[in-house]
Image (cartoon, rainbow, N blue to C red):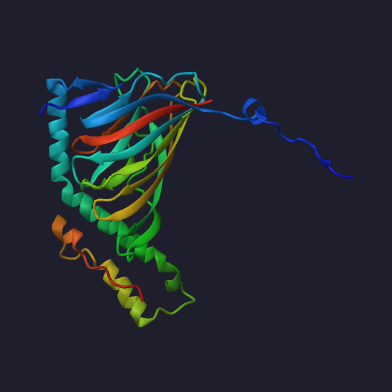
């Protein structure tokens, strides 16, 4: 179905050039699904690690449980190669 | 000694409106209907120093698509104003086990003409939408950059509640006279965008 812009309440059909450009954008979006998914995983991992960084300062000794938790976060992307795997990751529980 | 004596009238009926009060003035509303983009190319001028877009139940056709906007200085012929921005947000999943407040460095812009992301990974389930607002300040100024601030809550495709806070500036001293909204993929299936001027 032909696409349209909605401009001030009026539907304006895409030109052929706009259709082709949007088709290319849609293809790039589809092809980039894994890159987006793994980026989200890495961002979440980084935030979770950062939340416990204060426990890893030089004047504090990490518990074994916290060491294991932080290592599990660092390894969270190991072997993850598909979007489905990204979406089904089991995140470690913070001690 | 007292500052206010018994019986002193501080504000009488109507004095707030004439002395201090502003008003929210409706300009236009657009309702998406499988629309690839929604653009406002009229009503944004020097009439008001602040313009406010309300998003009500914006629903994407494609799951986990992102919601963007951009600015125009040529009445909508092109949407490519240079922008620098910040993006942070909070999220919580439906089980309450995954939640955080964080800065999302991948979503901000640094002197980029690209579209500015306003929401990440919007779900397209029948009941999944986003709602929120975008403020655009003094768009007709030919002296200053153009500040914008957005706050949106949406139902993320991964079943998260996400509250996004975006702020930045269009780095131009040309007048902004049009604004466009678009999804990263697919159409805006449904939803309303309302434009108000704040006096």
Position of the N terminus of chain A, as image quadrant, is top left
In the orientation shown, which residue stands out farthest toward the right?
Answer: B1
Q: Is residue A54 above or below residue B197?
A: below
In the orientation shown, which residue stands out farthest toward the left?
Answer: A1
Which x, y percent locates residue A62?
Answer: 40, 78
Position of the C terminus of chain A, as image quadrant, is bottom left
What residue do we see at 41% from left, 19% from top? B43
Q: Is residue B150 above or below residue B75?
A: below
Judged left or right of residue A11, residue B14 is right
What residue do we see at 23% from left, 25% from top? A5
- Is residue B80 at all visible to an observer of this figure? no
Of residues A13 and B140, the one nearer the viewer is A13
What residue do we see at 34% from left, 80% from top? A65
Judged left or right of residue B69, residue B50 is right
Please identify the quarter of the rendering in which residue A6 is found: top left
Which x, y percent locates residue A63?
Answer: 39, 81
Judged left or right of residue A38, residue B3 is right
Please identify the quarter of the rendering in which residue B172 is found: top left
Which x, y percent locates residue B57?
Answer: 31, 40
- Is residue B8 at all visible to an observer of this figure? yes
Which x, y percent locates residue B187?
Answer: 20, 35
């Amino acid at each position: 179905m032909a696409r349209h812009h909605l401009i001030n309440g009026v539907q304006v059909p895409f030109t052929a050039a706009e259709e082709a450009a949007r088709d290319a954008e849609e293809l790039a979006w589809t092809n980039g699904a894994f890159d987006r998914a793994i980026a989200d995983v890495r961002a979440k991992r980084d935030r979770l690690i950062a939340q416990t960084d204060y426990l890893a300062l030089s004047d504090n000794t990490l518990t074994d449980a916290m060491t294991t938790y932080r290592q599990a976060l660092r390894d969270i992307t190991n072997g993850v190669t598909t979007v489905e795997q990204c979406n089904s990751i089991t995140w470690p529980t913070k001690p | 000694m007292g500052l206010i004596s018994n019986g002193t009238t501080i504000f009488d009926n109507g004095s707030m409106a004439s002395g201090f009060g502003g008003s929210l003035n409706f300009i236009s509303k657009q309702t998406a209907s499988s629309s690839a983009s929604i653009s406002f190319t009229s009503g944004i001028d020097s009439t008001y120093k602040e313009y406010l877009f309300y998003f009500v139940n914006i629903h994407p056709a494609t799951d986990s698509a992102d919601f963007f906007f951009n600015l125009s200085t040529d009445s909508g012929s092109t949407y490519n104003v240079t922008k620098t921005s910040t993006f942070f947000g909070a999220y919580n999943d439906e089980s309450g086990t995954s939640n955080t407040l964080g800065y999302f460095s991948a979503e901000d812009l640094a002197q980029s003409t690209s579209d500015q992301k306003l929401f990440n990974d919007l779900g397209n389930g029948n009941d999944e939408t986003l709602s929120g607002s975008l403020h655009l300040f003094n768009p007709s100024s030919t002296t200053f950059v153009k500040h914008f601030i957005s706050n949106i809550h949406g139902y993320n495709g991964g079943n998260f509640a996400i509250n996004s806070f975006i702020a930045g500036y269009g780095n131009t001293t040309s007048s902004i006279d049009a604004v466009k909204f678009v999804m990263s993929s697919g159409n805006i299936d449904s939803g309303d965008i309302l434009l108000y001027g704040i006096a």
